[in-house]
Every structure is written in C-alpha cells, then in structure tokens.
Image: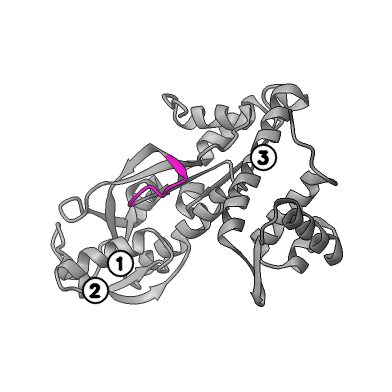
Amino acid sequence: MIEEFGGDFLQWLRGFYFVAKKESVTLAGLEMGRNQPTISHQIKCLENEFGVTLFDRSRGKMKLTPEGKVFLDKAISVFETIKEMKSEIGEDSKLYQGGVDIAATHAIIRYFLPQFIVHFTKKWPKVNFKLEGGGLKMILGRIDSAEADFGIANLNSVPDGVVYYDLIETGLKLIAPKNNPFSFDFEPTLEQISKIPFIFFPSSSTITPLVERRFAEDNLKLNVVLVLNNFESVKKYVELGVGVSILDDYTITRKDVEKLDIYALDRFFSPRKYGIIIRRQKYLSPVAKAFLRCIKPDLQFK
C-alpha cells in the first residue's frame, strides 16, 4: 500500500530544494515566485511530516542538518524520477526536442563544444542548449544539485556521487610571441620559463594549480605579471609581447600558430584527461543522451 502524504507534497519538496540551494528563505522565494511565509510553511510541513529538523537556523543562513543533506539527495532523486516519467510518457517523448544543460570549463565551451552543437542543432532544430562556464567547484556544484545534465572537466580524482567517462586527452603547450625576444632554447626548460614574464589564469582554473605544483617540484616559481580568466585575452597579451603562457593544446587554433611560437612541454607534464561527469541516478532526457553520444559515440551509460 502506498502511504498517504499530507498537503501538496511536491511543492513542499520544491520549496525545500530552493532553500537548500540558496541558504535563504527570501532568496528561494524570489527564485520560485513565492512569498517568504509560503516557503517557511512548506519547510515546516516537511519537518512535521518526517519528524526531523532539516535546517540549522542558528547561524543566520539556512544550513542543512545531516538529516537535511540526506533529504536533499532523496528529493533530487524524486524530481529526476518525475522528469523521467514526463519524458517517457508525456510530450517530451518526441525525439529530439527540449534543452540540454551543460556545465564545463570556459575552454571546453569555447574550443571543444561548438562543432558538436552546430552539427546537432542543424539536425535537430528544436533542441536548445544552456552552457555555463567556470571552475571545477561550480561545475561539480551544478552537477550535484542536478541543475546541469552533465559536466565536462579535468578531474584529479572522481568524487563520490558521480560517474565519469573519459572524453579527450590533451597536452600542455607553451605559447610565446612570434620570434619572441625571450632567451630560451627550442625546447625551453622550466627554469628558463620561470625567469620570463608569465601570463596566467586565476587559481580557480584547473590548469593553474597543476602548473604551479610542477614548477614547485623543481623549487621554481612562475614570474606572473598578469592574470586573466579568458583564453583569447591570454593569447592576445602573449602576442603583444607582455609574456608567455601555458595552455591545453586543444585551445590553440591554426590562426594562433600563425601569430605565436608554440613549444611542446610533454617532457614536463603528463597528458591531461577531460571527461564527462554525471550525477549518479541522474535522469538524462533522450535529447541529452543523444548529444552525449554525438560527442562520444562509444558511450555506454552506467
């Protein structure tokens, strides 16, 4: 027998989800288009229904209790199941239409995804994409909250709660101004690079800690003169002679080769792997699965 729940249970869950996400009843209400008393009532109804305290209200922000964290994971699974039901039974079952939400690094969005999105939207014009670029913390956060269908990033280790599929392998390259004025060999050493003005990315970038750590292994430190969060901006300032930089090779285009000197760094850095990251028990719509197979044809979903 299926147990009966009081009130509008799904709306209670929805209110709980947004409060957990925003850590604020007020901000949750703004996102949902509901007033604060309504959201507070939904949370109280859930706590009464299950006999637990879902939020610690003593620190100003609405922080999840241990029970609240478990409850959030279950609530997301409920909504994923509902999406699956709608897709398989309702209007969404018509292939292929709807949206695909992707969280990825800025470089993946700029240099890797365009060719696939252009191909896919030409074939399936009713499909729309939402792309959000940022660091690994943002990517994993949007995957964990089930906001993104999947993410693409470089991972040193695979966190609990997600599944990971290898996608591409890339090497690191040093870029310098054409006919550069800096004194280093055809195969520059890390010591030579450390003495040259260096243009780099913020610490939130996945490439920054990797490069800094490798130089530190040789007791070297980069001479950073400029920090930018945009690959094209980094290339432009390198082209202008402000300094050199290190990039993933898939971000270097034919036009870049004409404007910049490129040096391999394979002897210092192992290849980097970028992969597809999906929340465990995440429901993927038919269109999301179709796009994933577009970028990785041999993908077998776990």
* For residue 253, side relative to residue 29 (left or right): left
Using residue 208 as the reference point, say whether residue 195 is left or right of it.
left
Amino acid type, callout 2: Ile
Please, is residue 75 above or below residue 127 in the view? below
Q: Which residue is mark 3?
A: 78
Residue 276 belongs to magenta span = no
Residue 188 horizontal side relative to residue 162, left or right? left
Mark 1 or mark 3, which has the lower sequence index?
3
Q: Secondary structure at mark 2?
A: loop
Residue 219 sits in quarter: bottom left
The image quarter in which residue 176 lies: bottom left
Instruction: Return the mark for residue 244.
Output: 1
Q: Nearer the viewer, mark 2 or mark 3?
A: 3
Q: Is residue 157 magenta?
A: yes
Q: Residue at x 33, y 48 (%)?
A: 249
Residue 5 seen: yes
Which range is magenta?
156-163
At x 59%, y 30%, the residue is 120
Mark on residue 196?
2
Give the position of the C terminus as an image quadrant: top left
Kind of residue at disc 1: Val
Colour scheme of the rendered structure: one colour
**Helix, strand, or loop for circle 3?**
helix
Report if the CB atoms under discs 1 and 2 are less than 8 Å apart.
yes
Q: Spatial distance from mark 1 to mark 3, Cα to Cα?
A: 50 Å
Q: Main secondary structure of the magenta part?
A: loop
Q: CA distance from mark 1 to mark 2?
A: 7 Å
Look at the picture and state if 54 lies above or below 92: below
